[in-house]
Amino acid sequence: MKIIGITGTLGAGKGTIVDYLVNHYGYRHYSVRGYLIEEANRRGMELNRDTFVVVANDLRATHCPSYITDQLYLQAAENGENAIIESVRTPGEVESLRKQEHFLLFAVDADPEIRYERVVGRGSETDHISYETFLENEAREMSSTDPNHQNIGRCMQMADHVFMNNGDYEDLYRQVESVLQEIGA
């Protein structure tokens, strides 16, 4: 069983890589966002990006910095199939997942203007924001000294493979395919 974690900036293409691995390689998708939606619903909270951050930080502070991805890993291990965990957001999550056999971390990034256009274009409930809010959200999530808060910048530094996604789908797929050939996936 191979486990790939994925991290990256807002709108960089994490979901595109997930879809590629699911559709072309049969990976099973385990979503932190999905986990947080279930938890926010259970708590009767509004579904938006701020709620997801609050819920995630609370779960990490209550249990441990890697709690959410640990839960998703346990689900994946029980299933026994190749899996991708989206999205790894704290160094503690990376460290915990690295203790598991056959784990790799992918990171994806793109220029901010390109990412903002993608975010607005996908139009989910958390994506109706101004460019300024987009940049503020990203700045808040890129670094933190609190192990229970998001530090995507550090996670990206810890990645085994980093993809720059300023081009089209085919360019990103070529990059992913090159890494998959390298690792024998």
Image: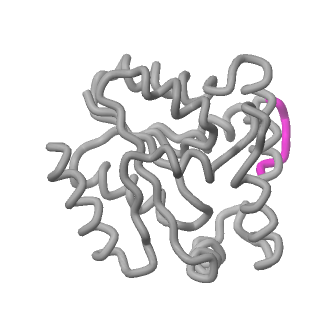
Residue 164: x, y in percent?
43, 69
Magenta stretch, residue numbers = 43-48
Q: Is residue 63 visible?
A: yes
| Colour pattern of the rendering | one colour
In reply to whether residue 56 is colored magenta, the answer given is no
Query: Which residue is at 62% across, 72% downward?
Result: 119
Front-most of residues 174 and 118: 174
Front-most of residues 96 and 32: 96
Q: Locate residue 152 relative to residue 61 in the image: left or right.
A: left
Q: Quadrant of residue 20?
A: bottom left
Quarter of the image with the N terminus in it:
top left
Query: Which residue is at 67% across, 34% downward?
Result: 38
Q: Considering only vertical position in the picture, is 106 above or below 72? A: below
Q: Quadrant of residue 123?
A: bottom right
Q: Locate residue 152 relative to residue 79 in the image: left or right.
A: right
Quarter of the image with the C terminus in it:
top left
Query: Which residue is at 24% across, 55% downward?
Result: 179
Query: Which residue is at 79% across, 55% downward?
Result: 140
Residue 115: x, y in percent?
58, 74
Q: Locate residue 169 relative to residue 123 in the image: left or right.
A: left
Q: Considering only vertical position in the picture, is 10 above or below 22? A: below
Residue 46: x, y in percent?
84, 47
Q: Is residue 41 visible?
A: no
Q: Locate residue 84 relative to residue 111 in the image: left or right.
A: left
Q: Quadrant of residue 27?
A: top left
